Image (cartoon, coloured by chain):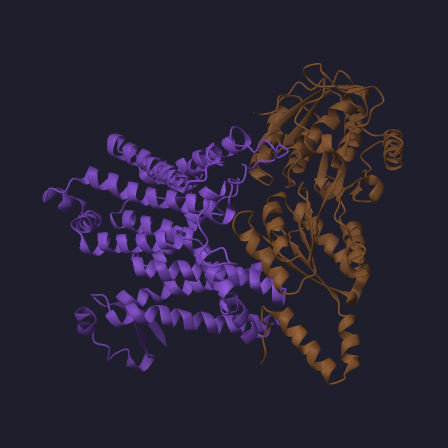
Chain colours: A purple, B brown
Amino acid sequence: MLLSLEPRGQQSRAMLLLSPLLAGALTLISGALLFAALGNPPLETLYTLLIMPISDMYGVTELAIKALPILLCALGLALAFRARIWNIGAEGQLLVGALAGSAVAIQLIDVESRWALVLVFAAGVAAGTAWAGLAAWLRTRFNANEILTTIMLNYIALNLLQYFIYGPLKDPAGYGFPQSAMFGDASRLPILFEGTRLHVGVFFALLALVAIWVLVQRSFFGFQVKVLGLDRRAARFVGFREKRLVWLALMVSGALAGLAGVCEVSGPIGQLIPQVSPGYGYAAITVAFLGRLNPVGILFASLLMALLYLGGEMAQMTLNLPLALTGLFQGMLLFFLLACDVLILYRLRVKLPWQRQFVATPVAKGA
Amino acid sequence: MSYPLLKKQSFKKLLCGLTAALGMSAALSASAQEPLKIGFVYLGPVGDHGWTYQHEQGRQELVEHFGDKVKTTYVENVDEGASAERVIRNLATSGNQLIFTTSFGYMNPTIKVAQQFPKVTFEHATGYKQAKNVGTYLARTYEGRYVGGYLAAKMTKSHKIGYIASFPIPEVIRDINAIQLALNKYDPQAELKVMWVNSWFDPGKEADAANALIDQGVDVLFQHTDSPAPIQTAERRGVYSIGYASDMCHFGPNSCLMSIVNDWGPFYIRTAQQVMDGTWKPEDFWGGLHDDMLKLPISDVVPADVKQGAEKIIASIRSGEFHPFTGPIKDQSGTERLKAGETITNQQLASMDWCVEGLKADMPK
């Protein structure tokens, strides 16, 4: 028996919707087999990984908190990626956003006016934008490859952050440990529900989601970005200004990453610490592609990614499952999701040996 | 199938009430002997050496000691950002009565969750904030560094000692100072060279730093990082090394002099016992050789007479007869920090941001 992939010639609309479901089913089956083979009750393990983390209100709010920075970064990245501008620098843009926001917040610890929060956010977003702007400038002025510059700017951002935490922004009452003072209440994002950590940052994310959706799907700018991504020469022929598009795409994604960073420090953390981001900016790259660069897809992808993190913690806590095993499960899910997407452009054909002579070549050509 | 709900405690109360109403006193006495649930939050993966591994060893010692009387859970790879608070809180909601948070970055989340769970006991490693139900604990690694400094002084031929440092926090500065104090006493012409790698674990950078130090003539290598790379590099290049956190000497069988090992087990056992007995009180616990929180296995690379000298220092520190930070001690600028005969306080150790006289290296600002 032979399996072969045949190009469909065009996207299959059915598979566009079916592929994630198929991937989900495959993951559940192979996950159950894996857990059973290792001596863990498969159903209970899957329940612990996927449902228990969000089985109460607190869990749902924590899911939102975990997904928030990834979602914000991924939305911005999607815009850049659509224009084939490979911004790998969301991590760095997030870190500078957090750094600049904190620098302002620490000056305003005793301020009680809500304007403090506005200033903190303005600083964070501006810093993220500027950091991405650096890459845009290098690209448009010197034609420097943005993949390299954005990666390198990540390291510079991390070192800048460390310099400030060990230096000017260090809490003078903190025994020399690398952390800033706690922010004043006015610089903290208001909490939405008592007893949880869910803050108004989720509204920013929803706003960003709608804005990016309109920008990408419904605006002339989005159309230009799409053309630029599909065919750079065509874009030039019709007179789209490539440099302007590069600047805008990078700055929008930098602004969103900066927003993510400042949301973290003024939201759940409440101070500047060296570990502001456990790699949200990099996770966002996966999420952007997992969501097929579509804002709604990205929303689901970021929630899924966050759920996998929470599930991993839960499985360790209630089942004493090693983290490596849940890591394996997470990898499996991502693999199936991407693998099943092959079926959108290709169809699977089974050739049985005795059929070989009947599979006439014209059929293959026609497809 | 019933699954553990997060609001387990209120469920338990309900069950207890029901069983009591039914007169099933046996069930009640059984629930009184329920195992003490203990949770651990780890910074890294458990692995097979290093900081988190030592805490995991401590947890296993605890389980071995108490058997069925405890039920432990750990969560590894918990980042010190926004996730810490969720993990600590979930450990508390799922019924753990004692929770150890084993890295500095968990300090503020631990304090915050502790306020919401006044009946749960928390112990936070290396921090400085205590509360009604939060204690802190810390190993006096500087005692090991002082002994290491003695070994280095006796073994070096080039009179150049290297130190691969992570971050300029008080713990690291304390340890560097302790080595310098030993060198001042046992080999005043020796120079301590410090190289910062700005990481707790980065085998590549640690190996680079080790090579750079050896190129500068260093022939005894200390590390304040978690990977075996410095010891392996020292072994390959034929210079001595001293391991940290775990007993790492098997990575350098011909060159490793000693390891400064954190042993958290005795402390975990004692704390759990106190919580069971209801005698636990929050304190700022500093454990050293005296409390078995620090172990200093000396390898056979060290000649017998030097080993004897080291054992003598270890014994005098353990008995409390000698403290590495005993005056007169001056800092780099020549200002007297401790008067003759004066012993340093924990407070001074906890906030140490100055270098002792004789150290040529500067702290990064």
Would you say B241 lies left or right of A243 here?
Answer: right
User: Within the image, what quadrant is residue B165 found in?
Assistant: top right
Residue B137 position, x and y percent, is 73, 44
Residue at 40% across, 47% down: A260
Residue B58 position, x and y percent, is 74, 52
- Residue A192 shows in the view: yes
Quarter that holds the N terminus of chain A:
bottom left
Q: Nearer the viewer, residue A292 or B123?
A: B123
Residue found farthest to the top: B334
Quarter that holds the C terminus of chain A:
bottom left
Residue at 76% across, 83% down: B24
Position of residue B360 relative to residue A33, above or below, is above
Position of residue A361 relative to residue A297, above or below, is below
Residue found farthest to the left: A238
User: Within the image, what quadrant is residue A366 found in?
Assistant: bottom left
Position of residue A73 relative to residue B68, above or below, is above
Q: Nearer the viewer, residue A330 or B318?
A: B318
Residue at 28% across, 49% down: A79
Would you say B363 lies left or right of A89 here?
Answer: right
Q: Nearer the viewer, residue A184 or A13?
A: A184
Q: Nearer the viewer, residue A367 or B69?
A: B69
- Residue A331 shows in the view: no
